[in-house]
Image (cartoon, rainbow, N blue to C red):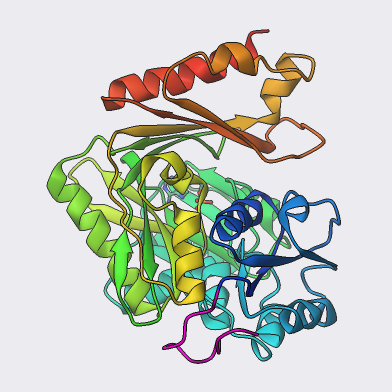
Amino acid sequence: MTGDPFNPAEPLEPGSVIGIIGGGQLGRMIAIAAREMGYRIAVLDPDPDSPCAPIADHVVHGAYDDRDAARDLARMSDVLTYEFENVDSDAAEAAGEITQLWPSGSVLRTAQNRVLEKGALNRHGLPTADFRAVETLEQYLAALKELSGPWVLKTATSGYDGKGQVVVHEADDGAAFRELEGRSPTLILERFVPFKLELSVICARDRSDSTVTFPASENIHVNGILDTSIVPARIEPHVAERAAELAKSVAEAIDVRGLISVEMFLTGDDEILINELAPRPHNSGHYTIEGCLTSQFGQLVRVLCGLPLGSVDMPQPTVMVNLLGDVWEATGGRPDWHTALELPGTNLHLYGKAEARPGRKMGHITAVAESVELALERARDARERARRR
Ligand code: AMP
């Protein structure tokens, strides 16, 4: 061990081991950034061939709720983090008793549960859609009366990419409740927000409470899954400032050390409501790899290792489009990267997943250009070219 991870004043020397719970594409990109800076990687994942495994120095094979495996990871690591919030918080906290876990187990618990998350935000005066926690049909029917519709009913835990949620359009006799009942102990009924666009801001907060916020991303979802991130978001400067302030307030309110990704809705009258938090790198922040002087992954590594936060300046507009398994399906498994990458300013990222299923995130393309319109056109065109073989 080089440097004391429990001592905030002491940075971890290169060669130290960063332990990551979860070996998906986010873990892989954290690992790539860490390796560039000379750190070593241990990863815990149920799949021994996870996307992070080829980049890692040590692979711990175990389920996300396997406390022994989590402790094994902790023993071989100088600092710990996680790459998604559906890892088991008890296992993460057990690991955190051995080696410092950032963001903390308490941040993880809050972000795992939409009711706790929205409750914590509201307690700190941070705006969200009105909501009610519901556990029974009676509570659900009462909540429909209390909040004006339309509504969205969601599982409080384990939802991602729009899974585990139902839009409820008119007073319903309980059908939506019955559809989701049992998928998580508590459901959350939210007012449907007629947003004009969706934004996200990633805030990094370090060991000495300094914060930086990456430029706000305008996010377009298709079928509940992020499709396109456009940066800078096409919003008034004062709205971008407000979004950045909100993300910073969230980081301070829930005491994040690491990254917090804050998803927001922008309403027709430019009001911002916070939808969801993710205490980790975020798909909408992949644009930072080429777009910003420091990527979201490099920034997390800096926080974990006690290094100063890096610049988040973005020299040119940047757009990211996700590549889902559908692109492989459309091309018999061989997307045309050659024609796609002929477009200037485009870059390809593939996550090394062997099986391309529809809806599965396989990679992304980023385009950097002089204008946001051109970056958007090139990113979309590149994906279309890849799909057209
Ligand atoms: P979530 O899993 O909460 O991030 O939701 C996935 C997507 O569903 C969001 O990005 C929105 O497009 C949509 N959505 C979720 N909650 C609401 C809401 N209260 N009002 C309107 N749209 C929503």
Residue 296: in magenta span: no
Residue 306 lies left or right of residue 158; in this view the side is left
Q: Is residue 291 above or below residue 255?
A: above
Position of the N terminus by quadrant: bottom right
Say whether residue 163 is visible: yes
- Image coords of residue 92 (percent x, y): 68, 78
Position of the C terminus by quadrant: top right
Residue 3: in magenta span: yes
Magenta highlight range: 1-13
Residue 20 lies left or right of residue 13; in this view the side is right
**Residue appearing at x 40%, y 32% in the figure:** 319
Q: Is residue 338 above or below residue 90?
A: above
Question: Who is closer to the viewer here, 83 or 200?
Answer: 83
Say whether residue 144 is visible: no
- Image coords of residue 88 (percent x, y): 71, 73
Question: Who is closer to the viewer here, 56 or 246?
Answer: 56
Looking at the rendering, which quadrant does residue 131 occupy? Answer: bottom left
Residue 194 lies left or right of residue 278; in this view the side is left
- Image coords of residue 72 (percent x, y): 80, 80
**Residue appearing at x 36%, y 24% in the figure:** 375
